[in-house]
Amino acid sequence: MKTVLYVDDNDEILEIIGMLMEGTDYHLLTVNDSSKAVAMCLEKTPDLVLMDINMPGMNGFEVTKKLRRSGFNNPIVVLTASESDDDRKQAKAAGCTDYILKTVDMRNVRSIIDQYIGEVGKLID
């Protein structure tokens, strides 16, 4: 069973993603703290990380950089409400695999996960 780690400081969004993932073939881990996300990611080595950008402490870009420097090579996909081109550029520079807007129909989260699980090393354009 593949593991997905979802990192977001908004507990309501974490709960929604949890409900959407019920009954799937994925094991979902959630964390609402960026420092805990780094530790969990390095300990559990999820197959895919869905990462929010705007979090207290380290933002999603900083978390991604830290994970990449630590040798984590699995896909990290930004899932954010920010449509900023600057944020997209920062995501790429940090080592994110892709950049997905939260405004996407949330029912499509599972298909997003299906698309990226196992595509290790693919970077966004």
Image (cartoon, helix red, strand yellow):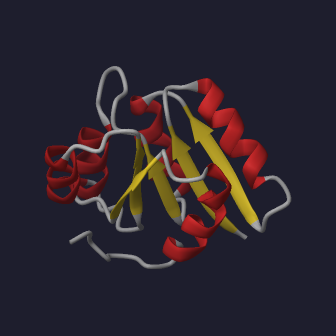
The residue sitting at 56% across, 35% down in the picture is 31
What percent of the width, then of the height, locates residue 32? 53, 29
In which image quadrant can residue 83 be found? top left
In which image quadrant can residue 82 be found? top left
Horizontal side of residue 15 vs 112, given as left or right: right
Horizontal side of residue 97 vs 48, given as left or right: left
Quadrant in which the N terminus appears: bottom right
The residue sitting at 26% across, 46% down in the picture is 66
In which image quadrant can residue 74 be found? bottom left
Q: How many marks?
A: 0
User: 121 or 83: which is nearer to us?
Assistant: 83
What percent of the width, then of the height, locates residue 51? 43, 46
What percent of the width, then of the height, locates residue 2? 66, 68
Where 67 falls versus 84 (above or below)? below
Where 10 falls versus 88 (above or below)? above
Horizontal side of residue 120 vs 32, given as left or right: left
Quadrant in which the C terminus appears: bottom left
What percent of the width, then of the height, locates residue 118? 50, 78
The residue sitting at 29% across, 29% down in the picture is 58
Where 19 falls versus 26 (above or below)? above
Residue at the top extreme? 56
The residue sitting at 39% across, 30% down in the picture is 35
